[in-house]
Amino acid sequence: MRESSQGIQTIPIRNELFARREIQCDGIIDDGATYSLCLQLRFLASEDPDEPITVFFNSPGGSVQSGLAIYDTMQAISCPVRTVCVGMAASMAALLFVAGDERLMMPHARVMIHDPLIAGGVGGSALELATVANNIMRTRQITAEVLARHTGHTVEEVLAITDHDAWFEAPEAVEWGLADRVISSL
């Protein structure tokens, strides 16, 4: 709340944080979250192309295609993007967290990386199944290349560790190159 000569105003907390160039990536990464995050990133970059933006993550991940749209936006804007993991950054959220220019983790935060998953039931002809398989393997390669680029590991090392759910506590995430440091205050 803010008091002014016009009385007391209630201002949503997200608006206050947005004014400080802080945005949230919480919940499932889907088309709606992608639209909102890309819009916020682009707007803040246009307001001040040199001032950092901080994105706070507490997300189980979601759609790879939606996440890659956010990733591309993060890479395309001119201002630095600081990422902070407060809780967990799993799956696609981990890939986005790792892509930050400065990657910070709270002491009890966790990161989980793994191969892309096929959502929903898969059915159809043998040729349709082959197309789905080829697409998921291409997506696997793309996500491994992104993780390798931002962690300093080779694509082969990333593929070896992401063949299962690989969970990292904050210090382990720093050690593996998924984060830069653990912080205890913001």
Image (cartoon, rainbow, N blue to C red):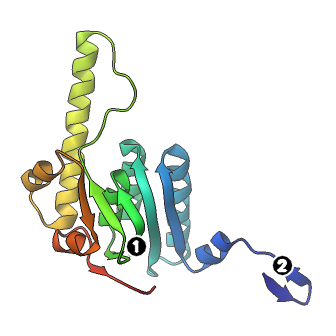
Q: Quadrant of the N terminus?
A: bottom right
Q: Is residue 68 above or below residue 167?
A: above
| Residue beneath disc 1 | 84
Packing grade of label 1 (10 A; few <14, some 14-19, many >=20) is many
Image quarter of residue 178: bottom left
Residue 112: x and y in percent read 29, 57
**Residue under the image location 8 percent in, 55 percent down:** 157
**Camera-side residue: 177 or 183?**
183
Packing grade of label 2 (10 A; few <14, some 14-19, many >=20) is few
The secondary structure type at the circle numbered 1 is strand
**Camera-side residue: 93 or 172?**
172
| Amino acid residing under circle 2 | Gln
In this picture, residue 125 sits left or right of residue 15: left
Residue 106: x and y in percent read 38, 77
In this picture, residue 51 sits left or right of residue 32: left
Looking at this rendering, what residue extends furthest in the top direction?
125
| Residue beneath disc 2 | 9
In this picture, residue 13 sits left or right of residue 20: right
Residue 167: x and y in percent read 25, 58
**Camera-side residue: 113 or 156?**
113
Residue 115 visible (yes or no): yes
Q: Is residue 133 above or below residue 5?
A: above
Residue 55: x and y in percent read 46, 69
Looking at this rendering, what residue extends furthest in the right direction?
6
| Amino acid residing under circle 1 | Val
Q: Is residue 82 above or below residue 158?
A: below
Separation of disc 1 and disc 2 at Cα? 30 Å
**Residue under the image location 26 percent in, 77 percent down:** 180
Image quarter of residue 149: bottom left
